[in-house]
Image (tube, rainbow, N blue to C red):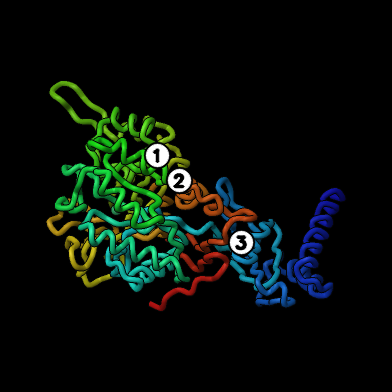
Amino acid sequence: MDKLRTVLMNEKNRIFDGFLRQSSDFDDAVAALRLGEFAQSGAIRRKKSFSESSRQVLSIVNANIVFPDRIMRGSVTIEKGVIGRVSPLNEAVGHVVDAEGLYLSPGFIDLHVHGGNGSDFMDATPADFSNITRFHASHGTTSMLATTLTSLDEELFAALDCYNSFVKTPYPGSRLLGLHLEGPYFAAEQCGAQDPKYLKTPDPSHYTEILGRSAHIRRWSAAPELDGIRAFAKTCRERRIVLSMAHTSCTAAQAADAYQNDGFSLITHFYSAMNGVTRKNCFRVGGLVEAGYLLDGLNVEIIADGCHLPPELLNLVIKVKGCEHVALVTDCSAAAGTTDGSRKIGSRKNGQPVVVKDGVAFLADFSAFAGSVATTDRLLETILNQTRVSIPQAVGMLTKVPAGIMSCADKGEIRPGADADLALFSYRADKIEVKKVFIAGEEFVFPSP
Ligand SMILES: [Zn+2]
């Protein structure tokens, strides 16, 4: 017991030293420590700021903090947009937010977003971009890749130009980590909701022009079996662009070649727009699905909206790949958050009409899904309700895994020095509800309904 008391006293002294350093005022430090003691008993009922120097400090207390491998009750201190201390004690300093026992996780990272709330990135206006970033932030997404689709070049260029200027000045909502180009180098027979009119094979003059248009391209989805893909992949690798296999009829052998020799490291919306086993007369041939399972280091993204993949496939993917190689994505379309049914996939002008039914978007003839209408909170809810993974594992597939895929060392985990992108949520009666979101340490103000 005495040993425990000594440990606790040492911890208290250390915290006090920390407060003193931040506040440069002995009385403030004493007050902070006292407030910390109240917080440990769950009795915080007020917000308090201390000296001038500690006003930029925010602490979230009484939180169930979600780490990759466990959940810990305690507090997180944020200073100047970065996580400072993470403690099992309730260290209340600066502006205090009482989490009241809610889960505090890293903000969700979505590597595949076309739009939401009536806007598509292909609409290429700053108003549409900020509509999308605000919409997804209100569901817990703190970072995303703005995703284009197969279109007229002039429309793609307009989206790239808009992105370039949009990120130059401050904007609201989710951070844009870069551009994800979905197309136009796809197999025609696997086009799904990508407009077949605009498909191309990779030609150096074409992709060089696209790459010259924006330095923000971070991911490119393409079919690895197309002629010219090897040179295309080399050019992308030189620019550290993440290559992802998508809308493809490649065999397992072609996929293994693309993974080992061309640097493809990811599969776009696993199971959608690709082959599993096919037959040539008597002989069976493995497809990209089998390659995804066989190649341990190849990551997969899944649209976990509860529609694109049934529970048995969600469970199979997680069982075989392991949570550490699965990223949850929305593939969210402009139709999410709208009710009037007038939205298209792609730009308002040239996109394809979609029908939203039973929580998912279809092409008008119901021949294919046309992206989803899901947000990241729904992905988390689906995974928790339909598989056996734990909250830390499910959160990891929305945070640490996508951050790792994009080499974002400062995002995806709650630890000192990481970006203070956080989501505070409840999980009760099979429902996820995001209550607060912090982006670079600032509380995001939810748009009024
Ligand atoms: Zn997509």
The answer to whether the residue labelled 1 contacts the one labelled 2, judged by CB atoms less than 8 Å apart, is yes
Q: Nearer the viewer, residue 203 or 26?
A: 203
Q: State whether residue 105 is above or below residue 43.
A: above
Seen at 14% across and 52% down, the residue is 197
Mark 2, residue position: 405
Q: What amino acid is at disc 1?
A: Ser
Image-based side of 445 in relation to 39, left or right: left
As drawn, which residue projects farthest toward the top? 282
Q: What amino acid is at disc 3?
A: Val
Residue 287: horizontal and vertical position, in percent?
Answer: 26, 32
- Going from N to C along the chain, the mark reached first, 1 or 2, is 1
Q: Nearer the viewer, residue 295 or 318?
A: 295
Mark 3, residue position: 82
Image-based side of 344 in relation to 243, left or right: left
Seen at 65% across and 76% down, the residue is 47
Mark 1, residue position: 265
Seen at 52% across and 65% down, the residue is 439
Q: CA distance from mark 1 to mark 2?
A: 8 Å
Q: Nearer the viewer, residue 120 or 242?
A: 242
Residue 363: horizontal and vertical position, in percent?
Answer: 17, 57
As drawn, which residue projects farthest toward the right? 2
- Going from N to C along the chain, the mark reached first, 3 or 1, is 3
The quadrant of the image that shows the C terminus is: bottom left
The answer to whether the residue labelled 3 contacts the one labelled 1, judged by CB atoms less than 8 Å apart, is no
Callout 3: 10 Å neighbours few (<14), some, many (20+)? Answer: many
Q: What amino acid is at disc 2?
A: Ile
Q: Element at badge 2?
A: helix
